[in-house]
Image (cartoon, coloured by chain):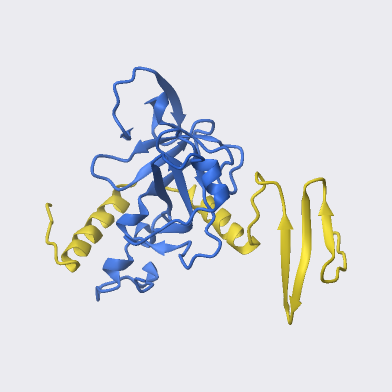
Amino acid sequence: MPEQANRTEETETITVQTSRFGEVKVPVSQVIHFPQGLLGFPVDRYFVLLRHRRDSPFLWLQSLANPHLAFVITSPMQIVPEYQVKLTNEDRQDLDPAGDDPLLTYALVTIPRGNPAAMTMNLIGPLVVNGRTRVGKQVVLSDSTYSHRQPVLAVTRAESPAAPESAGMAAPP
Amino acid sequence: MLVLARKVGEAIQIGDGITIYVVEIRGKQVRLGIEAPAHLPVHRSEVYDRIREENLQAAEAPGDLGEAFRLWGEGKGDRLAGAGKQDRRD
């Protein structure tokens, strides 16, 4: 069962219907508002973060409106430590106009069904979330050299003779 | 699709707030200047399409992350070992 991403003392909760985890109660403060939605999903604007489980690098980004819509996300810096998101002025305006809030960066993880070893994360369309206001945006990194299919297990498998070819190895940058 | 012929310096107006200028034509490449309201993001189509396509695939995630979690755990151990920090606790 997923747990709340952050435990707080708050009592105000909302109940979220999900197709993967059933009914989940989360603090209202955990709701993230994406005013522009995610690319390809313009309708869903409100999501909550659910931790996969303790010690897991994965979080679920679950839509409030659509029980079936949930993304697996992770902190990209765990895999690509030097990863940096360059925000445009417009991004800053949308996310943190005053410039003094903490911004959290997540990458969407694509896990092919039946072949989780080939999982990748999207480094050109990260999700940036204002940790205070809980406003988020999928940032488009137009001119970056990052991949939209960065192998998550690449660092390990590239050096391993037993690496499955299906993992599609790119040399670490 | 509407197709218009334009020369350098000419523009196309879309609705009230969007203007697209032909800035330069060099060989096979056209440089465009785009004026649009801030709430309308402008991106190169291939980048936008790639992210949208990847989002659609990411939304197909299996409900059970057990195997992905296990693989990640193995990778993490190897990464730490590779970095000279032996910190396996399994």
The quarter of the picture where residue A84 lies is bottom left
Q: Is residue B83 left or right of residue B51?
A: left
Residue A3, above or below B78? above
- Between A80 and A87, the one nearer to me in the picture: A87
- Between A95 and A75, the one nearer to me in the picture: A95
Return the x and y of residue A148 as percentages of the image width and height. Answer: 48, 61
- For the N terminus of chain A, give its image quadrant: top left
Chain (blue): A
The quarter of the picture where residue A4 lies is top left
Residue at left offset 61%, top offset 58%? B49
Chain (yellow): B
Residue at left offset 46%, top offset 57%? A122
Residue at left offset 41%, top offset 44%? A103
Residue A76, above or below A131? below
Q: Is residue B59 visible?
A: yes
Q: Is residue B63 visible?
A: no
Kindly give the residue lying farthest to the top in the view shown.
A11
